[in-house]
Amino acid sequence: MHTAQNLIKGYRRKRVIVCLLVAVVTLLLTFGLRFISQRDLNQHQIDAYARHTVESLDKILLPLAGKQHELTRLVGQPCERVHLPIRKQAAALQTLRSIALVKSGILYCSSVFGERDVVLRQRQPSLPDPQPQLLLSTDQSLIKGSPILIQWYPASQDGEDGVMLTINIHLLSSLLLEPQKPQIERVIVSVGNRFYSESQGISDTLQLTGDEDVETRRSMLFPFSISVTTPGAAMLALEELPAQAPLAVILALLLSAVAWIATAGRMSFTREIALGIERREFELYCQPQLDTRTGQCCGVEILLRWNNPRLGRISPDVFIPVAERENFIAPLTRYVLSETVRQIGYFPPNPQFHISINVTSSHFLHGVLLRDVSQYWFAARPQQQLVLEITERDDLQGVDYPLVRELHRKGVRLAIDDFGTGNSALSWLEQLHPDILKIDKSFTNAIGTDAVNSTVTDIIIALGQRLNIELIAEGVETPQQAHYLRRHGVPVLQGYLYAKPMPLAEFPRWLAGGSLPPKEHNGRVVPVIL
């Protein structure tokens, strides 16, 4: 069986779960999106660095290529004539270490040393060559053993004549090949089958550690490529994720708060009530009330039952208090009024037959109840008598007393339900001027068993008779209780002894089956079998 506390806790638990899910998803999305964004940014920067390095080295080599014809024309001329021009060219091309002229495989003139007589192949085994060459090698003359980049331009068809340009790699390293950590760990120049990096010098193999990623970009103009080693764009992005934690936490808290607010209406028991009203899930029941003087059914109390397709059957003891606490009782009352009028044909069209509907004191406020009764009841012009029952346990502060007078003027009777169970019975009698007092079933059940409550029952009966207020006893379940109440002058009885609450559609069949109250037989009370 559902309880209000369990239902509310269940909805609160669902809201907490939803908010936690929102927080977790927000964290995951924030970290995920930041990871993807940072990974792509890292990859873009790595690619941009490699591309920029290739373009920069191209810009260094392009002026050398532009001087190719000018320099090759000097090959074969005496060194004393061309030494000064090649020195000027070497000075103008600042990245050059030297310019050397080669004739018949002999290096005969250098911009650094002047006239020479060196067999080139002894210094550089792959030169001379009939094709232009770009080589990684080591210096054998100026700074022996230092890495150099050689650009060879042949000046004859057999390749024995030509110009050898020596490029200072150390200068290139400081200008172009400086790594940018943490994204770029090493920059490697690849020419042919040889590799150069500042940390490892020149080698015939590309030496990598196990945790390095390599990005390579080739020059479209010259036969070299630039490789950069990195920890990997993804690894770098992972390392930077902790810095995103404050943003992720703030977003998670913000969206969780939004989710908590947004689900207040959608994931609450009051929303279930609203859905129940909208989808007509509430069903009207009625419990007959019998006049002991005539032995006939003189009226019914309308009760509400809820078979929630999502939660199952929910007792009125559960949803009514929640509706009252959440200020949702007025929509329920309007539903009862409209449904009662819609199904009014199930009841005798007799002005002496009354239909009791429960209302709360808060519904009286600002004339709301009067407007609702006028809209749903009086507009339909039913012949039956309308009785509005207000429980004594309600707060009197919500009652608009001019409205009460107007209801009386319109012929609506007022009943105080559960009389005697609250703390201000006399105040209610004085201010509401009720037409009916309903004796609570706790007093009815105590008849014959509890001396204190029996005395209270007698006092209530005497008070009602003294003030000329009609009395109705609720919760009559035994013939002894019925006999006691009739003997003490209570004219209307209601309880399981006569009928349990039933759907409105079943009331005509019950009424046709007989509604006589229990009669005494040989001194004993015998209930009517229905």
Image (tube, rainbow, N blue to C red):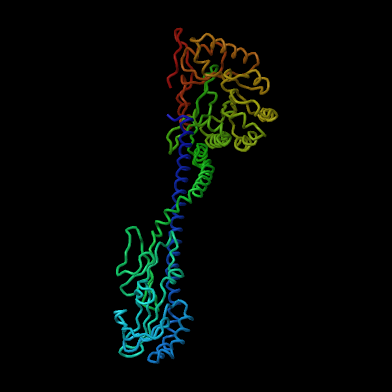
Say left or right for 306 vs 357: left
How far from the left and from the top, in percent, is residue 192?
32, 75
Quadrant where the C terminus is found in the figure: top left
Taking 282 as reference, is 97 above or below it?
below
Taking 73 as reference, is 43 above or below it?
above
Quadrant where the N terminus is found in the figure: top left
How far from the left and from the top, in percent, is residue 257?
53, 43
How far from the left and from the top, in percent, is residue 427?
66, 20
**316 vs 269, nearest the viewer:** 269
Residue 186 visible, this orientation: yes
**264 vs 433, nearest the viewer:** 264
Number of labels in the image equals 0
Taking 459 as reference, is 129 above or below it?
below
**515 vs 8, nearest the viewer:** 8
The residue positioned farthest toward the bottom in the image shown = 77
Residue at image x 52%, y 30%?
Answer: 320
**133 vs 44, nearest the viewer:** 133
Say left or right for 475 vs 195: right
The residue positioned farthest toward the right in the image shown = 402
The residue positioned farthest toward the top in the image shown = 523
How far from the left and from the top, in percent, is residue 495?
49, 21
Residue at image x 64%, y 31%?
Answer: 364
Choose top left, top right, bottom left or bottom right for residue 420: top right
Choose top left, top right, bottom left or bottom right for residue 179: bottom left
Choose top left, top right, bottom left or bottom right for residue 377: top right
